[in-house]
Amino acid sequence: MSCLFCAIVAGAMPAQVVLDEPDLLGFLDARPVFKGHVLLVPREHVDTILDLPARLREPLLEATQRLAAALVDGLGAQGSFVAMNNVVSQSVPHLHVHVVPRTKGDGLRGFFWPRTTYADDVEAAEYAGRLAVALADPSAR
């Protein structure tokens, strides 16, 4: 498979999945801006927002909203940064929404995205699990 995100959707590449729905998949970014940084992708290959079918617009935005809430509920973030690149700076040519946890004074400024790593797969799985629990229980808000 030539598209990394299509390979993740197909289960051919590993990922820490936090949201698994018929049309969408959300998983931890392997090189997060901050730990808990989620990438939300349509399951079908879509290059950019310009190519997104109308039937996926509302589900994509609604899932983005739920993920932003899960960062607060599951990780204790104060808020989130939500972004999408189109062609320029789009490292994987498959539409993806970045949902990044934010806290005051976290150092993120402008469009410079410093990257970090998880200590190991166990730490990544712990973050994914906390987000999945927060997504499963929206009444926790």
Image (cartoon, rainbow, N blue to C red):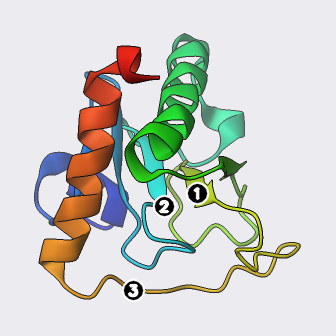
Mark 2 surroundings within 10 Å by alpha-carbon count, few (fewer than 14), some (14 through 19), many (20 or more)? many
The location of residue 10, given as percent across then percent down, is 16, 48
From this viewpoint, is residue 76 visible?
A: yes
> What's the residue type where badge 1 is placed?
Val
Q: Reply above or below: 4 against 24.
A: below
Q: Reply above or below: 27 against 131.
A: below
How far apart are the alpha carbons under marks 1 and 3? 14 Å
Which residue is rendered at x = 15% and y = 65% of the image?
A: 14
The location of residue 4, given as percent across then percent down, is 33, 66
Q: Which badge, 1 or 3, comes first in the chain's sequence?
A: 1
- Secondary structure, mark 2, is loop
The residue that mark 3 highlights is: 117
Which residue is rendered at x = 56% and y = 38% of the image?
A: 68
Residue 87 shows which numbered tag? none
Foreground residue among 42 and 79: 79
Q: Which badge, 2 or 1, comes first in the chain's sequence?
A: 2
Foreground residue among 85 and 137: 137
> What's the residue type where badge 2 is placed?
His
Foreground residue among 113 and 44: 113
Which residue is rendered at x = 24% and y = 36% of the image?
A: 133
* Callout 2–callout 1 Cβ contact below 8 Å: yes
Q: Reply above or below: 16 against 25.
A: below
The residue that mark 1 highlights is: 100
* Callout 3–callout 2 Cβ contact below 8 Å: no
Q: Quadrant of residue 61?
A: top right
The residue that mark 2 highlights is: 37
> What's the residue type where badge 3 is placed?
Thr
The location of residue 22, given as percent across then percent down, is 26, 21
